[in-house]
Amino acid sequence: MQVPNFSAVEVTGRRVLVRQDLNVPIQNGQITSDARIRAALPTLKEALDRGAQVLVMSHLGRPKEGLAISAQPEVSLAPVAKALSEALGRTVDLVSDYLGGLPDIAGDIVLLENVRINSGEKSNDPELAKRLADLCDVFVMDAFGTAHRAHASTVGVAAFAKSVCAGPLLAAELEALSQALEAPEAPVVAIVGGSKVSTKLEVLEALSSKVDSLIVGGGIANTFIAAEGAPVGQSLYEPDLMASAKRIAAKVKMPAIIDVVVADRFSADAEAVIKPVAAVNVDEQILDLGPETMAGITALIGAARTIIWNGPVGVFEFPSFAGGTRALTEAIAASSGFSLAGGGDTLSAIDTFGAVGDISYISTGGGAFLEFIEGKTLPAIAALQTRALRDGAT
């Protein structure tokens, strides 16, 4: 990526606008996973240590554009401001009215209220992008998780800010993805879980030609099971994509699904029953992969030198159906190979099973992570490259 790195840009005494992805899960006003906040901290600390005045910009949830935050308080970044204050050991004020400019930043750092409430954010309105750019001397794109969005705060601002660079987190994300996808050490194993093949078909297609082994889980696995002619009962699956599943399975080595964990209903208190995949009854649902299947999968992971992981293999939120994802997480954590994990449910599983420090690189991206795997150009990365070319030509 031919763009200036944050470490090479002078920021002392300058206003630095950092686009971060602080879109954390919040329930009843409490943050339930602070993984994205923890990932953002090194960049913010470095900027402060180097004497910058820091403006942090992020989105949260799915706010209605143009509607005041007072009318949709559930998407306010107030809990994030509190968490940042505690993590940095200094007050991080939340600023709601910032598009008209800001006075001096007394505490050296502020958090701007949810950028997606601003009219024109999603359409990448140039006027909004200019107003955001006017807030700073340096714009730092550090939100890999939003790099696939061509928004004013990710793409537009890069065209108008006085100085533009890639943040440390963004650079590290791209380096990790390149290591796993462009020049990986073989054998390469990929795990793709989730509810539907349709949401990850392009990812599965792309990986099937890049990896040595492909593991599927969740509702995605059910579609592959059905494609092999085995019963899936009342399980979530997509019959119209069984042909796609067969095509993918013919291209890449996939471990056999021998046994599964079923229940008569989708509930945390449902009885979990382990049975051969061919014995699933018409009134049962597959909610996890079975221990014999997981034994084969964990052996495969143990021999891998590169592991790419996106999505759990079962309904791990229910303790009775968490065995497969627990075994998967523990196997990846124990691997001596390079492991790259990404996606919201994946991060949650890593937190749940205490493997945060044992994964080589944990991506904060969801959609951006998947689109990079698919081989797509991420708009925010393209915007940084375009700006670098423009600056280099002047």
Image: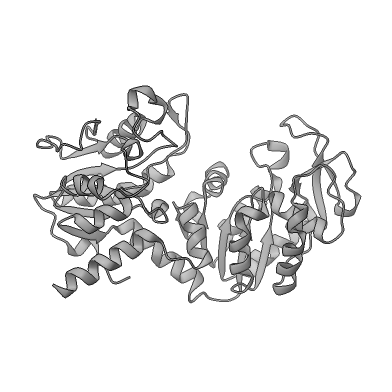
Quarter holding the C terminus? bottom left
- The answer to which quarter of the image holds residue 245 is bottom right
At x 16%, y 48%, the residue is: 136
Position in image of residue 277 (x %, y %): 85, 53
At x 63%, y 57%, the residue is: 192
Q: Is residue 314 left or right of residue 54?
A: right
Pick whichever, 383 or 204, lies toward us.
383
Position in image of residue 204 (x %, y %): 63, 63
- Indicate the colouring scheme: one colour
Position in image of residue 248 (x %, y %): 70, 68
Pick whichever, 323 or 227, lies toward us.
227
Q: Is residue 217 left or right of residue 83?
A: right
Q: Is residue 179 left or right of residue 211?
A: left
Position in image of residue 359 (x %, y %): 50, 57
Quarter holding the N terminus? bottom left
Where is 254 relative to 13, above or below? Answer: below
